Amino acid sequence: MLQQLKFNGEVVVVTGAGAGIGRSTAQAIAELGATVVLVGRTLATLEETKALIETSGGKAEAFVADVSKEEDVRALRDYVDGEWGRCKAIINNAGNNFVSYVTDLSTEKWNELIAVDLNSVFFMCRDFIPLLLKEKNPSILNVASTFGHIGHSKMPVYCAAKGGVISFTRQLAVDYGTKGLRVNSICPGPTLSPRVKGYFDSGRTNPAETLSKVMLGRFGECDEIGNVAAFLVSDAATFVHGASILVDGGQTIN
């Protein structure tokens, strides 16, 4: 089984790879031998991730794209196709969030978050599936959230989008499982990413209230999510399909 965790230079695309869970996921996959395409909107943060991977002996390439835009996703797909002609896995991690009651939300803000958190997953899956089907044991991993399963105060768009990601994942699993393409989602619980730390520091979210619902009594670290993500796109997980994997320290059993 340990050998099945290894990659042999196959290409794995990770969106939102400039920081947080995306960076940790990219590092874990590169450590296992994959060539990781790091995708994000800011070149400087992608280059930081790339340097960390290369310092550890891994392989990575940076590609600047806003995956909420169809044209950027097409350009990314064309780049991967032109350089390698195939793709082992895509990890749709790019996302954002903001805190607001639904009655205070403008249509523009709703559409902005849906574009990043849900539309980007659609664009990536649609454009990359033909490349994925050229590879042996390919997979898609969509990063959802425990908030796709449970509600959370003042996060109506995020909860709706992440619930959509989970349902979309299951639907793709129905259509593409018979073609050999595995499709899963991972649902992190409260994780100390830079974005979450920013919520705590600003006072928009109460860390004590959040932590009270986590049975392990602590927040998750980004690498704890990245390690599970790496397993799910490896050949060690070839019978995991259509699943919504909770990595939440017991948050959702409370």
Image (tube, helix red, strand yellow):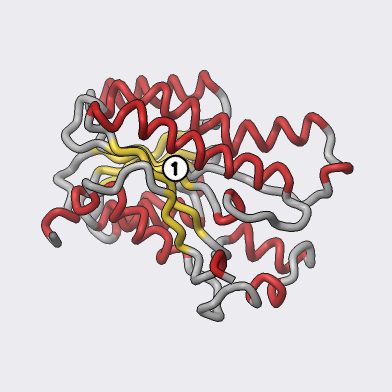
**Is residue 48 visible in the rendered structure shown here?**
no
Q: Is residue 185 above or below residue 27?
A: above
Residue 53, how many percent across, how many down? 32, 55
Q: Is residue 70 above or below residue 49?
A: above
Q: Secondary structure at mark 1?
A: strand
Residue 6, how many percent across, how many down? 17, 53
Quadrant for residue 125, please give it: top left
Q: Nearer the viewer, residue 2 or 13?
A: 2
Quadrant for residue 135, please give it: top left
Residue 81, how many percent across, how many down? 29, 22
Q: Is residue 21 left or right of 85 when viewed as pictured? A: right
**Is residue 30 visible in the rendered structure shown here?**
yes
Residue that lies at the very extreme toward the bottom in this rendered image = 217
Residue that lies at the very extreme toward the right in this rendered image = 103
Please name the residue shown 20% across and 38% down the image.
Answer: 137
Q: What residue type is disc 1 on?
A: Asn
Please name the residue shown 63% across and 73% down the image.
Answer: 213
Q: Is residue 137 above or below residue 134?
A: below
Q: Nearer the viewer, residue 70 or 225?
A: 225
Q: Is residue 9 left or right of 244 when viewed as pictured? A: left
Please name the residue shown 77% across and 35% down the image.
Answer: 109
Crowd rating for badge 1 (residues with CA inside 10 Å; few <14, some 14–19, many 20+): many
Residue 251, how many percent across, how many down? 56, 68
Residue hosting label 1? 142
Quadrant for the N terminus in the image: bottom left
Q: How many marks?
A: 1
Quadrant for the C terminus in the image: bottom right
Q: Is residue 13 left or right of 163 when viewed as pictured? A: left
